[in-house]
Image (cartoon, rainbow, N blue to C red):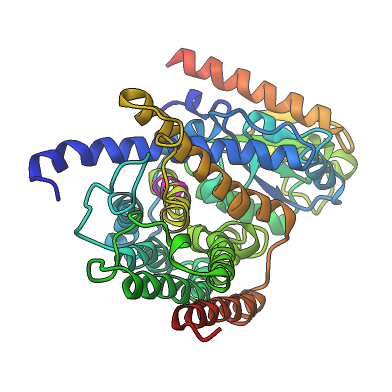
């Protein structure tokens, strides 16, 4: 728990650092994707240049749009993406709002940017945006189910094995030590499911049919330009690292400073660096690699993949953990 | 707000105003690993609302005249118009045809002409560099 003064000082710092790291990771992501396609790729600072340019451009609001919703939704999306950062352990520190929210709250916060995009798409009165918004809703319905199964399986595991607060606080416990061999297999399955949910959650390529620029001209973002588009751009980048940090907090919460026998400022730096490396690995596998390796799914295939394969995998993982906990085998 | 801020981050929207698809293929070729215009921060976008540069191919048939004007107006300021290919620059083999509403510069203001039938991807990249220098000069004036 923290007092109000600390929060007022720390919230803008976390927001600015979060946006900076997010855009930096976006630059790394674009370079790596280019290298995998045998291209040279843009410079590392490209996302910063893009955002600067978008904020300088004219901000067009269509004549038939519902203007207040259209203008408000990019702000809502960015605010929700940044709000997630306050509930997730970052750089080896405890979450800023530790004790005020748990993993269940984080799932709901993750849903808000997508909902904001859906509302903005419907409010912009463009037919392409309407199709995109419908697809975004279907995609959300699809990935929320396996995601919820994974989170609830872990929450149930933690709450039934440790004397922990109501659901569980993120990053406090290493869940791998709580289970036997079968349970570890189940946790690996849940981890894979979370990695597979990640591109859907952040709108990366195999699951980007809501924004498919080659078929529906930008989808939900069709009518957005200038500053509003820039806010959505930042929001998507922040959401990517927030989701990666969430996976890290659930599955690999440990710090490195104790292992290396470091103390003081060295320990803090080592932990922060270790955290960035973990996030980088998750972003690389969950977003960059998948989006280079696979082409875009049709919206019907998105539903099939998530409700069929991913949900089945998550349920199987839950079952393995349950068997392990009840001591049947 | 000045044109100089567009530098190094040009998002491109491609308008086919009645082209034979030759220039269009060369534009796509400049995105491939061999030429890779993403090096310069360029990106092909799906809607004029996101675009900074309009790449116009084709000589503008009568049917496309109003649509080209609308796409130009839908693009947020500041913006640059590049014409790719002989048809758009002068009319090309369709010069003075009864079907044409003009070369592109009779319909919307043009900043850079890239000639060729079709122009090579190198020529398109050179055109982008010319657009940059033009943008920089306009930035200095302001």
Please name the residue shown 58% across and 80% down the image. Answer: A316
Q: Check if residue A233 falls in the magenta segment.
A: yes
Q: Check if residue A247 falls in the magenta segment.
A: no
Q: Is residue B139 above or below residue B114?
A: above
Q: Is residue A230 above or below residue A125?
A: above
User: Which of the pair B45/A59 is nearer the observer?
Assistant: B45
Q: Quick check: can you spot residue B77?
A: no
- Magenta stretch bounds: A231-237
The x and y percentages for residue A212 are 62, 61
Instruction: Quadrant for residue A175, please give it.
Output: bottom left
- Return the residue found at the far bottom: A328
Left or right position of B55 against A322: right
Q: Is residue A70 above or below residue B102?
A: below
Q: Quadrant of the C terminus of chain A?
A: bottom right
Please name the residue shown 41% across and 41% down the image. Answer: A255
Q: Quick check: can you spot residue A220?
A: yes
């Amino acid at each position: 728990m923290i007092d109000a003064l600390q929060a007022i000082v720390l919230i803008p710092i976390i927001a600015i650092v979060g946006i900076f790291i997010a855009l930096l990771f976006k630059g790394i992501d674009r370079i790596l994707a280019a290298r995998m396609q045998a291209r040279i790729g843009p410079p590392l600072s490209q996302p910063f240049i893009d955002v600067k340019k978008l904020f300088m451009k004219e901000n067009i609001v269509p004549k038939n749009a519902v203007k207040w919703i259209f203008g408000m939704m990019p702000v809502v999306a960015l605010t929700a993406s940044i709000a997630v950062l306050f509930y997730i352990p970052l750089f080896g520190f405890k979450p800023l709002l530790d004790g005020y929210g748990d993993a269940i709250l984080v799932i709901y916060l993750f849903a808000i940017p997508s909902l904001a995009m859906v509302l903005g798409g419907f409010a912009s009165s463009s037919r392409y945006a309407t199709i995109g918004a419908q697809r975004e809703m279907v995609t959300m319905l699809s990935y929320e189910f396996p995601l919820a199964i994974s989170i609830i399986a872990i929450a149930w595991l933690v709450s039934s094995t440790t004397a922990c607060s109501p659901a569980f606080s993120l990053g406090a416990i290493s869940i791998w030590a709580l289970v036997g061999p079968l349970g570890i297999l189940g946790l690996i399955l849940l981890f894979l499911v979370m990695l597979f949910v990640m591109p859907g959650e952040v709108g990366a390529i195999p699951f980007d049919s809501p924004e498919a620029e080659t078929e529906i001209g930008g989808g939900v973002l069709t009518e957005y330009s200038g500053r509003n588009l820039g806010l959505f751009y930042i929001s998507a980048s922040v959401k990517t690292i927030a989701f990666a940090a969430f996976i890290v907090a659930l599955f690999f919460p440990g710090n490195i400073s104790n292992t290396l026998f470091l103390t003081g400022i060295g320990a803090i730096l080592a932990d922060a660096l270790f955290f960035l490396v973990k996030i980088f690995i998750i972003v690389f596998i969950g977003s960059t690699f998948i989006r280079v390796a696979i082409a875009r799914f049709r919206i019907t295939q998105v539903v099939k993949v998530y409700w069929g394969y991913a949900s089945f995998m998550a349920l199987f993982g839950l079952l393995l953990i349950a068997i392990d906990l009840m001591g049947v085998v | 707000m000045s044109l100089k801020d567009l530098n190094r981050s040009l998002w491109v929207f491609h308008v086919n105003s009645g082209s034979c698809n030759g220039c269009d293929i060369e534009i796509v070729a400049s995105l491939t690993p061999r030429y890779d215009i993403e090096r310069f921060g360029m990106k092909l976008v799906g809607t004029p609302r996101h675009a900074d540069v309009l790449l116009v191919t084709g000589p503008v048939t009568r049917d496309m005249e109003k649509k080209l004007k609308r796409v130009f107006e839908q693009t947020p300021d500041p913006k640059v118009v590049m014409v790719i290919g002989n048809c758009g620059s002068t009319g090309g083999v369709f010069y003075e045809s009864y079907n044409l509403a003009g070369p592109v510069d009779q319909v919307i203001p043009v900043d850079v002409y890239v000639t060729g039938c079709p122009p090579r991807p190198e020529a398109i990249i050179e055109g982008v560099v010319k657009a940059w220098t033009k943008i920089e000069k306009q930035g200095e004036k302001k």
